[in-house]
Amino acid sequence: MKRAQEEMIGFVLIVIIVAVFILIFIGFMISRPEKQAVESFEAESFVQSILQFTTDCRDNLEFLSIDSLINKCQKKENCLDERYSCEVLEKNLNEIISKSWNLENSLVKGYSLIILSNKQPILTIQQGNSTSNSIGAVQSFVKSGVSTEVDFEVSY
């Protein structure tokens, strides 16, 4: 009879220890911070990659990248086929951003891209809602003596 009581006490102790471990595990899972919808390196990489994207605007039979097209837009020049460079820039950036940062059925709620030339905005693209939770990236460069800043922000 005494042996059965010892086994029961041992069993109860094991159940209590397992229950404590389960409660601790649940506590860690609940208090763990949520993963951000967008990491800062994603926004930075996105900005750097769009600047290298090749557009369909030609200059001297060469296709221009976005950063070269920004420079052409700052000078208010046309592409070789007489399209206005700023319109081509806006069209290309809208396509790239809308395909890369889908707002439908996503944790991303909105985005904003602002291109500044000597601290003056030359292009602004905004879509969706701006929230207090956001990640941004800024890329600055000087081309042909003109200071340019590309500011991109994603809200989630």
Image (tube, rainbow, N blue to C red):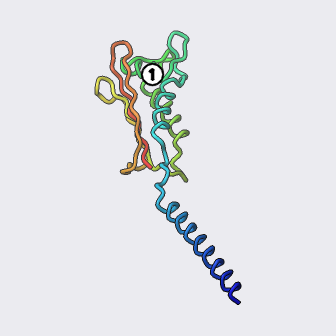
Residue at the limit of the structure toward the bottom, as seen here: 1
- Disc 1 marks which amino acid? Asp
Q: Is residue 77 left or right of residue 97?
A: left
User: In the rendered view, does 85 fall on the left or right side of 117?
Assistant: right
In the rendered image, which quarter contains the N terminus? bottom right
Q: Position of residue 136 (x, y in %)?
A: 40, 39
Count of numbered labels shown in the rendering: 1
Q: Position of residue 24 (x, y in %)?
A: 52, 65
Query: In the rendered view, does 10 fall on the left or right side of 86?
Result: right
Check the image and name the residue furthest to the front.
Answer: 2
Q: Is residue 81 above or below residue 113?
A: above
Percent x, y for residue 69? Answer: 45, 21
Residue 96 vertical placement versus 5 (above, below) = above
Judging by the rendered image, the residue that carries numbered circle 1 is 67
Q: Residue 22 versus residue 80: which sits nearer the camera?
A: 22
Residue shown at the point (53%, 25%) measured from the top left: 53
